Image (cartoon, helix red, strand yellow):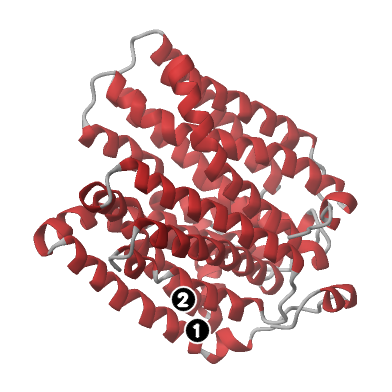
Amino acid sequence: MSVPFPRVLREEPQFRLLFTGQALSVVGDRITTIALPFATLHIGGDASDVGLVAAALTVPFLLFALLGGVWADRLPRHRLMLGSDVVRLVVQLVAAGLLLGGVAEVWHLVVLMAIFGTADAFFQPAMVGLMPSLVRPELLQDANALRSLTMSTGQIAGPAIGGVLVAALGPGGALAVDAATFAVSCTALALLRPRTVARDVEPAAPNALAELRAGFREVWSRGWVRGFLLLMVVYHVVVLPAIFVLGPVLADAEYGGASSWALVSVAFGLGAVVGDLLVLRFRPSRPLLVAGVAFVVASCQAAILGSGLPIEGIAALEAVTGAAVSIGYTLWELSLQEHIPEASLSRVSSYDYLVTVGLMPVGLTVAGPLSDLIGLHELLAIQTVVAIPIALLVLASPAVRGLRRKAPAAGDAAAGAAG
């Protein structure tokens, strides 16, 4: 697939600066996902401790995502992101120092990762809200696609780099490398100068709770947001546990172990890259409709895993779902950025993170015990029966099917395909 150098990188220097810092930071994040389990085991922890450290990263989204949205709609978003990155830089330096010094304990990692996750909960809603002040409206889709591309390539490159670093430098050394990537991101954010965008006039809210209620009204007043949030909840709580929990168990029991699951994971990542490249080329006139179709495809992952196909067939189908996931997320964020008032964008995004990242640990926690209770393939079948009909129901909603691009540029209309 021939893809020209994206216009948004040529024409928007502020986005180019952000993209450079984030591309490296994403790889660092993926390095951490490899280093943390080995760090926990290296200091004497067991499988339960590995899960506890992992949960410490995600639970803060349940507690702080909404507050992060409020702050991001109040404060300069790039400064809030800079503060978040500084906190996470310090956390990784402390964790690396404790590990390299041989004094780390499991509770140290739990506390440090809880602080890391809290800072991340403030970063993500601010990032979504920042994008319209960095790029022109007609380039928002490209900008989101490139952000997604950094995550997709990081998903492939990060674990490989992380494995090499853990082997060569130990878990502490790998976390120190991640700290260095945060230093690069901090530098980029400190230099960033977003356009001054007049935030829509909104009556001054007396407190954070009132601002949260105002953000909730923005969510509830739009049927397409309500419907898609339902789809996202089901995808994260019902479908993703099939990938993160049941998939490795299935590979170990029926497909020869970790090497087979690595093939599936790499295929998904490559598919995600292809999906990002597709979104860079095509401009659907109804992005949310295309995103809905994409998540119907993505919701088939439990069925794919339980299909009984050879591992090569599962990997090939997972590559298709990887492309669908990239397309779906990119066009969902684009729809929010185009249709939600700029003054409320981070708060609306925070509800998205609350019901996705925040609730995902619920599904991850119960998937294992449920598979032991009712059987692995039986649970995969239940996940399929729940997820696909709900995705189709949301796709059938007139509010989702009818949402069109907001004032698309003539150049975009000529370059892209109608959806």
Relative height, residue 207 to residue 98 (above, below): below
**Residue situated in front as seen by the camera: 263 or 413:** 263
Q: Residue at 42% of width from left, 74% of height from top?
A: 230
Q: Is residue 25 left or right of residue 143?
A: left
Image quadrant for the C terminus? Answer: bottom right
**Residue situated in front as seen by the camera: 314 or 58:** 314
Which residue occupies the extreme left position in the image? 373
Label 1: state its secondary structure.
Answer: helix
> To which residue does mark 2 refer?
296
Q: Is residue 122 left or right of residue 109?
A: right
Q: How many marks?
A: 2
Q: Residue at 40% of width from left, 33% of height from top?
A: 113
Relative height, residue 195 to residue 52 (above, below): below
Q: Position of residue 62 (x, y in %)?
A: 39, 53
Contact, mark 1 vs mark 2 (Cβ under 8 Å):
yes
- Local packing at callout 1 (Cα closer than 10 Å; few below 14, some 14-19, many 20+) is many
Q: Position of residue 338 (x, y in %)?
A: 71, 71
Image quadrant for the N terminus? Answer: bottom right
Q: Position of residue 53 (x, y in %)?
A: 32, 35
Q: Residue at 32% of width from left, 63% of height from top?
A: 305
Amino acid type at mark 1: Leu
- Local packing at callout 2 (Cα closer than 10 Å; few below 14, some 14-19, many 20+) is many
Q: Is residue 200 left or right of residue 322?
A: right
Q: Position of residue 107 (x, y in %)?
A: 29, 25
Q: Which mark is residue 395?
A: 1
Q: Earlier in the sequence, mark 1 or mark 2?
A: 2
For the residues marked 1 and 2, what is the alpha-carbon distance in whole angstroms? Answer: 8 Å
Q: Which mark is residue 150?
A: none
Q: Is residue 124 left or right of residue 419?
A: left
**Residue situated in front as seen by the camera: 247 or 91:** 247
Q: Residue at 40% of width from left, 14% of height from top?
A: 98
Amino acid type at mark 2: Val
